[in-house]
Amino acid sequence: MSEINTGGGGGKHDGGKVRSKKVSTRVDMTPMVDLGFLLITFFILATTLSKPSAMTYNAPDKTKTEETEPLKASNVMTIFLGDNNKAYYIFGKAANEDPEVKTVGYGYELRKAIQDNTRKVPTDKFVVVIKPTKKSTYKNLVDMLDEMAITKTQRLAVVDELTDSEKTLLKDKAKLEL
Amino acid sequence: MTDVAFLLLTFFILTAKFRSQDAAAIETPSSISGIKVPEKDIMTIGLGRDGKVYFGIDDANKRIAMLDNIAEAKGITFTNKEKKDFSLMSNFGVPLNQLKSYLNLPKEQQATFKQPGIPVDSTGASASNELKDWVFNARKANNDLRIALKGDNLAKFPEFKNVLATLQAQNINKFNLITGSEAPPAGWKSDSE
């Protein structure tokens, strides 16, 4: 492997005269290059390539209570984050008014549902209420907030408590036991 | 070719920034958010897939100050060696009553030790909630700390809620969620651009 080549320029004996051998100065580079590539591979793998990004989460201040106008159910889309990466939503009706519960997966389905519903009411009135159930995961919430960023929904609320009528609604129509 | 290879090698050596040893592997969800996580003055609360909570701050010197603060508040004393070992941990998930014995474990055993996670509770303010003490004392040691929450894909929502309650009990209402980067859907434009 790492011998020094001395063969190349060696003189033949001509006529018995002893001449000094011409020694080639070429060194076999293969092992060094091998090592070089090995190190490159190592550093490529060890470097963190994609830097993480951050999304900001603003929670309401619990110490302040602000009197706000009650929300009209007709402008509100309530999204329940269920188990097995499924989301359920109701739109336009309160939970006790027997609304239609629709099931969507995260991603395109959910995005389309939000966009469709946004068009049905004046943009500045549209409110999304996100209700993560205890069976949902952190990923579901982040995905949900990400959809909010994608659909540019400005008015949203994350509420982690379900009312009794919502619980019965989910149990009856979405078979989601809470 | 060799020249190029070694040029690349030099480049990677110079730009390499090694991943620090984490207390637990956390796979974060991804988002389209383009905000970069700040590199300085950051407190990271990790939430593992099994709901264990991990805690860490970025600056090794501030870690000692933080440990001093919490030791004073809880009436525990740490030796200089323990403090030094503590300052080398980028994050940890050990309850206070086990911290001392954990720091005295040999390095190999520390790596294999199953960290039980920092105790939290749903109200965010009870005496058994140690996360609130760490958050409070870390902010005491460094007032400019920003808070980042790094949760695992599979962490359940109630566990996130406990951390949220702990932060809100200290009137921290704004923080970052660390996520991976993902490309926004085609045709999507940010309002700020």
Image: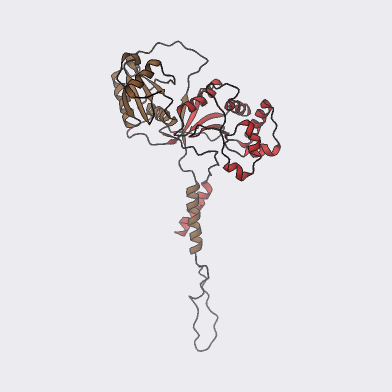
Chain colours: A brown, B red
Of residue B135 and residue A8, the one placed in the foreground of this image is B135
Q: Position of residue B187 (x, y in %)?
A: 32, 33
Q: Quadrant of the rendered structure where residue A103 is?
A: top left
**Horizontally, is B48 left or right of A126 in the view?**
right
Q: Quadrant of the rendered structure where residue B129 is?
A: top right
Of residue B19 and residue B157, the one placed in the foreground of this image is B157
Name the residue located 29 percent from the left edge and 24 percent from the top edge: A116
Name the residue located 55 percent from the left edge and 85 percent from the top edge: A18
Name the residue located 62 percent from the left edge and 44 percent from the top edge: B107
Q: Position of residue A73 (x, y in %)?
A: 34, 14
Q: Position of residue B31 (x, y in %)?
A: 41, 33
Name the residue located 49 percent from the left edge and 87 percent from the top edge: A14
Q: Position of residue B170 (x, y in %)?
A: 56, 21
Of residue A175 and residue A12, the one placed in the foreground of this image is A175
State the quadrant of the C terminus of chain A: top left
The tally of labels here is 0
Image vertical order of residue A62 relative to residue B81, above or below: above
Q: Residue furthest bottom?
A: A15
